[in-house]
Amino acid sequence: MRRPVATAAGAVAAVGAACFGWGLLEARLFTVREARLPLLPQGSQDLRVLHLSDVHLLSRQATKLEFLRSLADLAPDLVVNTGDNISEAGAVYPLMQALAGLRGVPGVFVFGSNDYYAPKFKNPVCYLLDGRSHMAAAPPVELPWRDLRDRLEGYGWVDLTGHRATLEVDGLRISFRGTDDAHLEKDDYALVGGPADETADLNIGVTHAPYARILDAMAADGMDLIFAGHTHGGQVCVPGYGALITNCDLDTARVKGLSRHGAAHLHVSGGLGTSPFAPYRFANRPEITLLTLTARSA
């Protein structure tokens, strides 16, 4: 009996090694996901929205930086950045250089945990058991988030971290509101809460982690569209089944892409990166989304 058992164990180990190797490769297969949503007033021209999230950049990631440089070729009308841009202090300058082609394009942003603090190793099994990660007990290493914020604002992008703003984009009046990171429990929706702007053509909510308390509040206030990231699309998925976790209290059916949350439309980005301590994806390529908003039908 030992030989069949040993053979089976060897086969399982080989399959596991192959899957892990593919996961390391897939994490570098950067993808542009495209979607359309009829949300604008009748007669409006299409609005191309680049949703960028969870880059988790390390300065040595040349392939990722090359992909980021290519995003300007998509010619977006608006950039929405839902945070977790960097994984080390030295990544701020390379990130901004890679995004230089988007300078001057109207944009908004909020921060996630890995804009504030460097990532630390966490046992992947804990994600499966608890469904989400937690801050390590040791004090976190702060990242230069103020420098990152100033540089993003230098590109003309508006910080929505606990703020409201209104932008004119291609003749459309768009009202935005955003929160700080709910995963770190830094969110305070009361800072931006209240009824939607009835004079705006579009009301948009922006947050990093799509926790129910934020989505519920934004939908109740009449947001037309909510942008979020954080989930990495589940990062490791089961082919034919999908994500096992979302790293928050969002259900796995809405781990990425377009869905509804009450009366609001929700777009969750699958994200572009991973933690440096878990640099793999499976059945879930890293992505940005080009979301084209179109006019509503009559």
Image (tube, grey):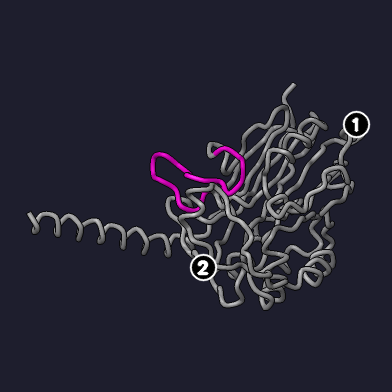
Which quadrant of the structure image shows residue 221? top right
Q: 76 or 195, which is in the foreground? A: 195
Magenta span contains residue 247: yes
Q: Can you tell which quarter of the image residue 161 is in?
A: bottom right
Query: Disc 2 residue type?
Result: Phe
The amino acid sitting under disc 1 is: Glu
Which label was assigned to residue 277?
A: 2
Q: Is residue 238 left or right of residue 56?
A: left
Is residue 176 left or right of 75 when viewed as pictured?
right
Name the residue at 73% across, 69% down.
100
Range covered by the magenta-colored residues:
234-251
Question: Where is 140 relative to 53, above or below?
Answer: below
Residue that appears at 8% across and 58% down: 3
The residue closer to the viewer here, 193 or 104, is 193
Give the total number of marks visible in the rendering.
2
Label 1, secondary structure: give it.
loop
* Percent of width and height locating residue 154: 84, 67
Specify whether 72 is left or right of 231: right
Q: Quadrant of the C terminus?
A: top right
Residue pointed to by mark 1: 198
Residue 176, given in percent of the width and then of the height, sits at: 84, 45
Whole-Å distance between the Cαs marked 1 and 2? 45 Å
Give the x, y percent position of residue 83: 70, 58
Q: Position of residue 255 (x, y in %)?
A: 56, 43
- Mark 2 residue element: loop
